[in-house]
Image (cartoon, rainbow, N blue to C red):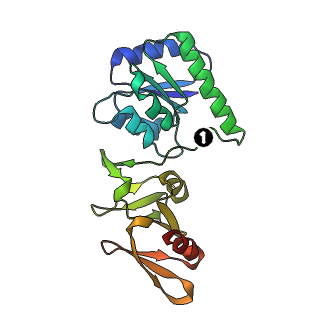
Amino acid sequence: MRLLIVDDERPARLKLRHLLAQQDGITAVEEAADGIAALERIASFRPDALLLDIEMPELSGIELAASLPEPAPLVVFVTAYERYACQAFGCDAIDYLLKPYDGDRLARALARLRRKLAAGADGQPAALPRSPLEQLLVSERGVTRVVRVAEIQWIETADNYVVLHTAAGSPLLRQTLAGLVDRLGTGFIRCHRRAAVQVGWIERVVTLDKGDGELLLRGGARVPCSRQYRADVMARLG
């Protein structure tokens, strides 16, 4: 099992490393001192799970967990604060370790991770459906940008990425369209094999030849709407 420790306090990271060294089945461990560094490590290290602190500068553990790119690693929160438990399990955390913890408590959390990973390997759901995202984290040229889901007007595919069209720009996110729409919740709907739209931004539906059409959005964007998806869009608009 490959694990990424994310904690802004070095002593806390060292303690976790020490306890993990006493556990079986841990094949690799890396560290990140904040949420932004964690995003970079996730892309290169590809951990099975995060051991994630909550109160960190710039980006909290809750914010990071809610914005993980697919396929997302599993999450175990490791924190000194009880008050975040409800939010943590809203991010589908596998476990919630309260500091101070010992090796036995960590071992139980790791056992839960192994069961979830094994279930996923057998083709069974590894976790319950996660709550819809409220924001996405997009890394561009060493800068991580927070994109609020409410500001995304529509999305289109671009090779192995999706383009998030907002009034402020169109950043690229390494993700599949189907996976992202599933995570964004019922506010978004596919309107084309290469596009999806946030329903609340639709202002008009224009019918074109052969049953295809366009969606005119508030702000002026024109989004393709193919015949295959047009009925679903119209039904969602009511």
- What residue lies at 53% left-to-right and 43% top-to-bottom? 130
Residue 4 sits above or below residue 236 on the image: above
Residue 171 visible, this angle: no
Residue 174 percent location from the top left of the image? 45, 52
Residue 194 falls left or right of residue 10: right
In the picture, residue 82 is in which quadrant? top left
The part of the image, by quadrant, that contains residue 43 is top left
User: Pointer 1: what residue?
Assistant: 128
Residue in front for this viewpoint, 41 or 214 = 214
User: x, y (%) of residue 181?
Assistant: 51, 57
Q: Observer-nearest residue: 211 or 87?
A: 87
Residue located 52% across and 89% down the image? 209
Left or right, 164 with respect to 176, comes to left
Other residues around mark 1 within 10 Å, as few (<14) / some (14–19) / many (≥20): few
Identify which amino acid the numbered label 1 is placed on: Leu
Report the front residue among 227 and 24: 227
The x, y position of residue 147, in whole percent, is: 34, 52
- Return the residue found at the far right: 122
Q: Residue at x 55, y 30 (%)?
A: 94
Q: Is residue 30 above or below residue 160?
A: above
Residue furthest to the front in view is 238
Image position, residue 67 (x, y; %): 42, 44
Front residue of this view, candidates 95 and 179: 95
Describe residue 117's horizontal placement relative to residue 175 as left or right. Answer: right
